[in-house]
Image (cartoon, grey):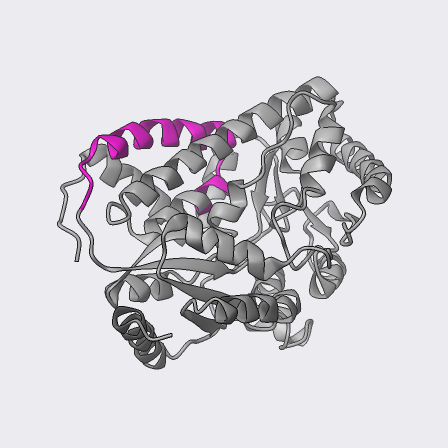
């Protein structure tokens, strides 16, 4: 176990703040809206051009699953939809999202395509929008004109909702603010790699989750206070087994599971999850027209994603390279149950890791329940396999 290091009060305060935000994001957003008298637009996570919403003066936030059991939604969507899809519908139908001024969906997966129509028909939430962002990116040169056309449609939609013109200059300014946030989060991850025992995996994930819910300027200010304090702390000796986490492309991680990983004698040194490194992996080119920059980021093939079809990219090779780069000793793959894109492509990872004798554990997680005792045994087995050098 790492040697305990006393963290400054400002660090503890910031970590407590983001933990509270993640525990009750709805109240945080209601309070923010009341203080600032600005509209809030919720979007499906991952690929939506949030910078365009930010440029209107509205607050873009990414949709998240509730911590509560799903009830009403099962009368409207299939029980074999992923937890995120069912939870979004459930919260909307229970009236928990009525503070929103709009919701933006796109064809991220088969399940996502039907959600806006259920919500629009059964709730008073205004401005339920569905936009087409090409799910096939194997030939970016062919796809880009269509993508730019759809980004212009989004621009017109945002102008209608916000009641103001959305200029290229405004979008460019928002891109700079978002890129700054990405650079600060990358700096946070570099600090974690050098000193993995300094912050728990759940604390890192909470910081990233806060970025998806806060105004970016406010989150940038938070990181600018936090990072210098963390970087001043001494490196913590840590002989725990080093783990690289993969998966959860839309879902935030189960924090109890992340705690259990580290409580069982392992430490997360890096990740490839959406509430982690994937969130800030790609920046937008600031030296081109902003619509071109946003389109190029969407079509960037250097970050494989199973929700975007690109059969020429070997996802397993990508994970293997990331694993070696961070100095990990094993891989834990978090798979949200009923996520067809991840299930389809998981075999690429499994095959590549097995071929290279890299220890790996697949954990399939549900919204409703997970057998933590059974999981504890499997995590102990992975740790012992790595410690004994079993291939």
In the image, the segment drawn in magenta is 209-236
Q: Residue furthest top?
A: 169
- Above or below residue 304? Residue 56 is above
Q: Is residue 113 left or right of residue 226?
A: right
Question: Residue at point 58% right, 34% down?
Answer: 283
Task: Give the quadrant of residue 156.
Answer: top right
- In the rendered image, residue 297, in percent from the top left (x then y), is placed at 67, 38
16 up-or-down from 95: above or below: above
Q: Residue at left 70%, top 65%?
A: 111
Q: Position of residue 3 (x, y in %)?
A: 13, 50
Q: Which residue is more in the foreground, 70 or 307?
A: 307
x, y (%) of residue 244?
40, 57
In the figure, is residue 34 to the left or right of 312?
left
Q: Would residue 72 be found to the left or right of residue 28 on screen?
A: right
- Which secondary structure dominates the residues rendered in magenta? helix
- Residue 250 appears in view: no
Q: Is residue 125 magenta?
A: no
Please determine whether, in this image, residue 385 is positioned above or below residue 236: below
The residue located at (20%, 57%) in the rendering is 239
Q: Is residue 191 left or right of residue 281?
A: left
Q: Position of residue 391 (x, y in %)?
A: 38, 74
Question: Which quarter of the figure is the N terminus placed in?
Answer: bottom left
Q: Residue at x 61, y 35 (%)?
A: 39
């Amino acid at each position: 176990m790492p040697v305990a290091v006393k963290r400054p009060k400002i660090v503890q305060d910031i970590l407590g703040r983001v933990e509270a935000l993640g525990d009750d994001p709805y109240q945080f957003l209601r309070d923010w809206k009341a203080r600032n008298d600005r509209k809030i637009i919720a979007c499906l996570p991952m690929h939506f051009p949030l910078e365009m919403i930010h440029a209107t003066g509205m607050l873009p936030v990414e949709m998240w699953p509730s911590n509560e059991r799903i009830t009403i939604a099962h009368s409207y969507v299939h029980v074999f939809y992923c937890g995120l899809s069912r939870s979004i519908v459930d919260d909307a139908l229970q009236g928990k999202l009525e503070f929103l001024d709009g919701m933006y969906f796109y064809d991220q997966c088969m399940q996502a395509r039907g959600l806006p129509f259920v919500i629009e028909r059964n709730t008073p939430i205004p401005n339920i929008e569905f936009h087409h962002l090409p799910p096939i990116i194997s030939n970016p040169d062919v796809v880009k004109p269509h993508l730019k056309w759809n980004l212009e449609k989004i621009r017109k939609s945002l102008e209608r909702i916000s009641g103001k013109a959305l200029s290229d200059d405004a979008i460019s300014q928002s891109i700079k603010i978002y890129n700054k946030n990405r650079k600060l989060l990358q700096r946070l991850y570099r600090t974690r790699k050098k000193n993995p025992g300094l912050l728990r995996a759940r604390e890192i994930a909470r910081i990233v989750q806060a970025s998806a819910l806060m105004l970016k300027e406010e989150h940038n200010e938070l990181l600018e206070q936090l990072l210098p304090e963390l970087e001043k702390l001494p490196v913590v000796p840590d002989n725990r087994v080093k783990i690289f986490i993969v998966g959860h492309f839309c879902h935030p991680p189960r924090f109890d599971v992340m705690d259990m990983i580290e409580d069982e004698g392992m430490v997360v040194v890096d990740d490839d999850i959406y509430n982690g490194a994937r969130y800030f992996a790609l920046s937008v080119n600031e030296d081109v027209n902003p619509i071109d920059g946003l389109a190029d980021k969407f079509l960037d093939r250097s970050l494989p994603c199973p929700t975007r079809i690109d059969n020429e990219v070997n996802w397993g090779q990508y994970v293997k390279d990331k694993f070696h780069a961070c100095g990990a000793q094993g891989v834990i793959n978090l798979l949200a149950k009923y996520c067809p894109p991840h299930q389809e492509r998981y075999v690429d990872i499994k095959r590549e890791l097995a071929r290279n004798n890299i220890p790996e554990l697949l954990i399939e997680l549900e919204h409703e329940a997970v057998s933590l005792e059974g999981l504890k045994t499997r995590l102990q087995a992975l740790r012992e396999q790595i410690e004994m050098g079993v291939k």
